[in-house]
Structure formats: C-alpha cells, structure tokens
Amino acid sequence: MRRSSVKLVLAGALPLALAGCGPSEQKDTVNAKANFSSVQECADAKVPVNICSDAYMQALSDHRRIAPTYDDKASCDADFVPDYCQVTSDGKYMPKLGGFELGFSGQVPKEALDRANQEVTQSAPSGMSGTTGLMAGLLIGNLLSNGFGNNRYYSQPIYQTRDDRGGYYSSSLPSQIDRGKTFGRSTQAQSSPDRSYGKSTLGRNLGSSGSGSSSVSSTISRGGFGSQASARSGWGGKSSSGSSSFGG
C-alpha cells in the first residue's frame, strides 16, 4: 500500500497545506492543530466534549508545571501582554492560562479524508475559509469521532503574547521560543546557565504528537484515571475506545 504525507498546519490564520496526494494513493498522514480558549469553544468545533475536557486538563497540568514565573508583575507582563499575569501562592507572578492547543496526527484513508473535508466545509459557518482555527478544529473533531489516527492527539497550554506589530495572539511556549523569545526575566531563565528559558526547560517536547508530547487517546478517564468514556461528537460518527496514555 502506498502512503503519502499530508500536512495540515492549522492554527490561527495559518494556511491549509495539502501535499503529495495522487489518484493511486490510498492513505494520507494528517497533522492538524487548533487553538481553543475554552472547553466550550472546542466542543463548538464538534470535537468530542470528553476530548476537549481532557485536553484542557492536560494543558492546565502542564501550565502549572512549566509556565514561566517572575519576581515582579511588570517583568511578567513584559513577556506576555499588559495585566495578563497573576500572583502565585509563593508570591511570584505567572501568566494566566489562555487556553490549549489540540493537535492530531495519524494515518487516514484518502477517501475518508476527502469525506471529512467535505463535511467540514459544509458544516462551517457561511463565508468561513479553510485558513481558520475553527476549520482545523472541525477537521480534528471529525477524524477523532470516526476513530482515525488510532485516536491519538496531544494538548499543550497557550498564552497571549504580542506579535511583531504589537498585536495580540495566542501561542504555545514552544512556538514562542521558536520565534526567538527567551523569557530572560523569568526565574527559570535567571537560574539557567545561558540565562534563557528554552525548550529544555519544558522537560519534554509538548508540541509534536509521538515525540514525548502530552498525548492522550480519545478514550479518557472520568472520576479518576481508571474509568473510561467513549468519544462522541456531533458528527454522527462511531464511538471510539482505548486506554489513556499521558506522555511524561
């Protein structure tokens, strides 16, 4: 069976990119990601609500572990946006959790991917193009609801920050580090040999599924990690099952 690689880089206003599709190819590798400010926004994109909830809880856990901390509020706000940081129980300052990035990676039959894209286009609000985060979320929800990609996905926290033109947007810490941010005034940077907060500070790669990221299956726990729940959404797809698996 021939396999092609299709990459969907879909977060914020990034364009949809499909490459390597041919008439004789039967499977595509799909990578997609979308940012959500809340569980409700995630569920509105027709991602199964248990996935949205679990992804948020994983992002919250990582936020408490890896968010940069500062000795004063001004230094924290300078790395993020004005009045964005809050005091911690030990008197430090850290940015608020701005939401979570939900990512999907897996093999999808080309026919199923075409059908999913068609359903996403038909269900999207009028005038919406394929360049939006909601479109990415709709696609992720459709694929996970139908059990593709071995129901694997990852989650990581996102934070409000400034772009080069002074505007605000939400982004993960690895993405901000890739843009050259060092969080040099954070307590983590102050205690590091190179005086910067880099990806090694995160403790693991949070941004790519299958590479030590915070990945979970679409069967998640409720009331403790021993119980299970099947993922369902508004797509009318089959329920999916599996075991929880958190990267660490």
Image (spheres, helix red, strand yellow):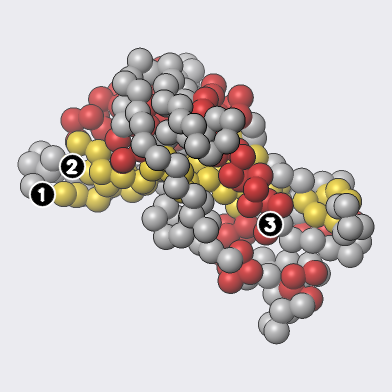
> Disc 2 marks which residue?
27
Expressed as whole percent of the image width and height from the top left, the position of residue 214 reads 51, 51
Distance from disc 1 to disc 3, alpha carbons, whole Å, reads 42 Å
Do labels 1 and 2 touch, CB within 8 Å?
A: yes
- Examine the rendering and report whether any part of residue 139 can be seen: no
Expressed as whole percent of the image width and height from the top left, the position of residue 52 reads 54, 32
Q: Residue at x 42, y 35 (%)?
A: 218
- Which image quadrant is residue 190 in? bottom right
Q: Residue at x 36, y 36 (%)?
A: 242
- Examine the rendering and report whether any part of residue 236 can be seen: yes
Determine the secondary structure under disc 3.
Answer: helix
> Disc 3 marks which residue?
65
Residue kind at label 3, given as amino acid type: Arg
Q: Pick whichever, 60 or 172, lies toward us.
A: 60
Number of the label disc, if any, that sits on residue 2? 1
- Which image quadrant is residue 110 in? top left
Determine the secondary structure under disc 1.
Answer: loop
Residue kind at label 1, given as amino acid type: Arg
Residue kind at label 2, given as amino acid type: Lys
Placement of 225 over or under 235, stated as above or below: below
Distance from disc 1 to disc 2, alpha carbons, whole Å, reads 7 Å
**First along the sequence among labels 2 and 3:** 2
Residue at the bottom extreme?
193
**First along the sequence among labels 1 and 3:** 1
Number of the label disc, if any, that sits on residue 155? none
